[in-house]
Amino acid sequence: MKRAVVLLSGGLDSSTTLAICRADAFEAYALSFRYGQRHDHELVAARKIAHSLGAKEHRIARIDLRVFARSALTAGLEVPKMRSAAEMASGIPTTYVPARNTIFLSYALAWAEVLGATDIFIGANAIDYSGYPDCRPEFIRAFEQLANLATRVGVEGARFKIHAPLLALSKAAIIQRGLSLGVNYALTHSCYDPSPDGLACGACDACQIRLKGFREAGLIDPIPYAR
Amino acid sequence: MKRAVVLLSGGLDSSTTLAICRADAFEAYALSFRYGQRHDHELVAARKIAHSLGAKEHRIARIDLRVFARSALTAGLEVPKMRSAAEMASGIPTTYVPARNTIFLSYALAWAEVLGATDIFIGANAIDYSGYPDCRPEFIRAFEQLANLATRVGVEGARFKIHAPLLALSKAAIIQRGLSLGVNYALTHSCYDPSPDGLACGACDACQIRLKGFREAGLIDPIPYAR
């Protein structure tokens, strides 16, 4: 069975990506990060999802992005709430963490090389991507090029593939795909600013995009919301 | 004054690179990593060099590469000693840490973006590079491409430059360049396997390449050796 490293945040997109990786007959090595998030609910969700979707292994790497980042996700900035679709589409939000996907993919690359894997899965999405530059197709392709040049196996002729199977899917299509593959979305966590007991706020960009996705898919989001 | 992030290990190459960055009239932000090295002497050296060469700031980011890596530099493997030049030139050594420069440059990119800098300096060297794939010119250029696609300022039209001023220099030429810029090589540390009190072993690849460099430059290495 071919091995693959899967970046797994515990959110809707990365959980669906893990399910796709498994459906593509890979042995999945799930990788999450403790990077100074404001809360732990994401990592708890990642642990549950990795188990429920049969990941061979799940590792949580501790990295300190707070040293550099000024982001509403890691620093004291306020998470923006109830922004309109037009506001979300305009520019890069304060929840942007500099170079985050570059750092995450670099770690995935290191683990892949140790595992003898040349396949890496990431749940980047260019449709509902909230304006993050490192969720664009051209970024994914550039990292693939880099991986071939950066590694021992690349030098020896292997070719890395960065799988971003959600890149061109709407949130509704992602949810439908995930349900067809048995993803239990009740286990996932998307909210940027949950209540202390982990209830999603329903108002941040992540919640709004998620709720809209379920609505457009004609479905009810199975997680509870604080409001 | 333009800002630049400089990757600084505390060794000969990165110390020279910091001096070149300063000579190019950049305000230098030096970045080191605590990544599970076998010893702390490198980081102590980095601290001294950053101060002596007038870095504006020096940060040490803690990252855990031991989670993934099987390398003589971080795991329990034996550091190879007294290898011939031919042995060093053949293949990638056990001191190789998977994706290390990719991870280091990713962190530098994150800090650069926060600082509003688009210049990053790395002491990669393709001549005496001991067979590391991520010290080759094509790797550096690929990372530059990636940086432009990965970041907010890249999206807005800025262009990153990854400066690798040592890429085509011999170790002797690096030493001569550094001396002309006032680098105090007595403060630097290169050895992969020093004694508990920090004396260089004189036999690992790093020591051998360093000693050969000073010899070829017609100079005496100012640091003490255990043998």
Image (tube, coloured by chain):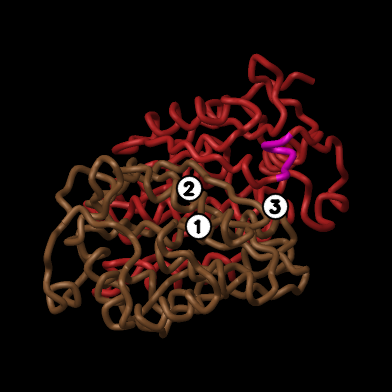
Chain colours: A red, B brown
- The question of residue A14 being in magenta is answered with no
Dot 2 falls on a residue whose secondary structure is: helix
Amino acid tagged 2: Thr
Circle 1 residue: A165
Q: CA distance from mark 1 to mark 3?
A: 14 Å
Residue displayed at 23% across by 45% down: B195
The answer to whether dots 1 and 3 both sit on one chain is yes
Q: For residue B36, which quarter of the picture?
A: top left
The residue at which mark 2 appears reads as A17
Q: Is residue B212 above or below residue A112?
A: below
Residue occupying the point 43% across, 71% down:
B124
The image position of residue A219, as x and y in percent, is 66, 34
Q: Nearer the viewer, residue B137 or A78?
A: B137
Type of the residue with mark 1: Pro
SS state under label 3:
loop
Q: Position of residue A90 (x, y in %)?
A: 84, 57
